[in-house]
């Protein structure tokens, strides 16, 4: 992909996945998600962020968590699996640097709780982030609250933030998930971008890659918006593909035709 940076005089790869948090585009839903995230963490509750594939959920989670200082918060960041509760408990233990030895759920829940109490005793707030949470099984949701509660529900050991596709909500609405779902206080949904926001989003990515002039014509922006449905990952792939196609033709700006060519290369 060096062809893009060279052809367009950029200092770094545009539309990268690993953009530093300070350089993120202020997506319309990002600030309100961060408010809900903070509220849930401050109150020891749970919150949920949903969105279509590639709408910016994981990046928003990263942005929210990056504001915490490690001396005050211990962020446990997991990617969900379709495994059992035992699997999740093991993931938490490993993330906390403890090698889980037991095959008993009861012992593992006790171990996780004692690890969380240890963190609290160091005046840190543990925060559990579970990305791809739509993959969790219903039987895991049915028991998830047991990790977080202590002393007959008189205090919360850890706030929980779930991120996932929209079917996560269906799983949370299932009757066996109610004990956990009742602890959710905020629901955020990452909406697809509107046409004008998409224009700003593309220009933002060009600018943080060191671009100083517009690289996409208005017709290209509309084509990227329509073909991506306003979703960020797809928009990024189309934008990069269009820049490559335009560079191959020696065009000074990417057009809708270049976006069309790019769209034949992605799924
Ligand atoms: N605030 C932002 N500013 C700039 N780029 C962003 C922002 N949020 C997301 N992106 C870009 O959009 C792409 C998709 O974002 P992300 O991976 O967070 O989506 P997702 O909703 O978690 O996707 P999936 O459903 O596949 O897990 C990322 O590669 C990232 O570069
Ligand atoms: Mg993601």
Image: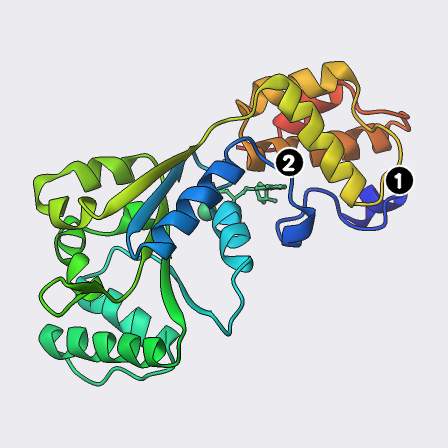
Where is residue 166? Give x, y as percent.
33, 34
* Disc 2 residue lies near ligand 1 with CB under 8 A: yes
Residue 49 seen in this snapshot: yes
Q: Earlier in the sequence, mark 1 or mark 2?
A: 1
Determine the residue positioned at 63% across, 24% down.
Answer: 197
- Which residue occupies the foreground of this view, 161 or 262? 161
Determine the residue positioned at 84% across, 32% down.
Answer: 248
Q: Coloured how?
A: rainbow
Q: Secondary structure at mark 1?
A: helix
Where is residue 243? Give x, y as percent.
78, 32
- Residue 206, compared with residue 107, is above or below; it is above
Q: Secondary structure at mark 2?
A: helix
- Residue 83, compared with residue 121, is above or below; it is above
Left or right of 19? Residue 108 is left
Determine the residue positioned at 13% across, 58% down.
Answer: 143
Determine the residue positioned at 35% across, 50% down.
Answer: 40
Residue bearing mark 2: 236
Residue bearing mark 1: 7
Where is residue 28? Give x, y as percent.
55, 30
Left or right of 248? Residue 133 is left
Res 239 → quadrant: top right
């Amino acid at each position: 992909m060096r062809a893009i940076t060279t052809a367009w005089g950029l200092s770094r790869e545009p539309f990268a996945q690993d953009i530093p948090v300070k350089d993120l585009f202020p997506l319309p839903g990002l600030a309100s998600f961060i408010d809900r995230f903070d509220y849930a963490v401050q109150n020891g509750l749970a919150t949920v962020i949903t969105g279509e594939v590639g709408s910016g959920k994981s990046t928003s989670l990263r942005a929210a968590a990056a504001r915490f200082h490690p001396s005050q918060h211990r962020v446990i960041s997991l990617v969900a699996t379709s495994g059992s509760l035992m699997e999740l408990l093991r993931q938490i233990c490993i993330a906390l640097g403890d090698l889980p030895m037991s095959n008993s759920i009861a012992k593992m829940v006790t171990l996780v709780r004692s690890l969380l109490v240890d963190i609290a005793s160091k005046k840190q707030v543990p925060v559990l982030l579970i990305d791809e949470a739509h993959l969790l099984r219903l039987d895991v949701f049915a028991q998830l609250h047991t990790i977080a509660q202590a002393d007959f529900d008189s205090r919360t050991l850890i706030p929980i933030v779930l991120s996932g596709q929209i079917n996560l909500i269906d799983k949370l609405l299932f009757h066996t998930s109610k004990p956990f779902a009742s602890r959710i206080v905020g629901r955020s949904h990452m909406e697809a971008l509107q046409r004008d926001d998409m224009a700003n989003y593309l220009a933002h990515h060009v600018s943080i890659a060191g671009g100083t002039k517009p690289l996409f014509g208005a017709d290209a922006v509309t084509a990227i918006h329509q073909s991506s449905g306003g979703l960020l990952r797809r928009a990024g792939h189309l934008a990069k593909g269009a820049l490559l196609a335009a560079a191959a033709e020696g065009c000074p700006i990417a057009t809708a035709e270049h976006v069309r060519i790019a769209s034949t290369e992605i799924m």
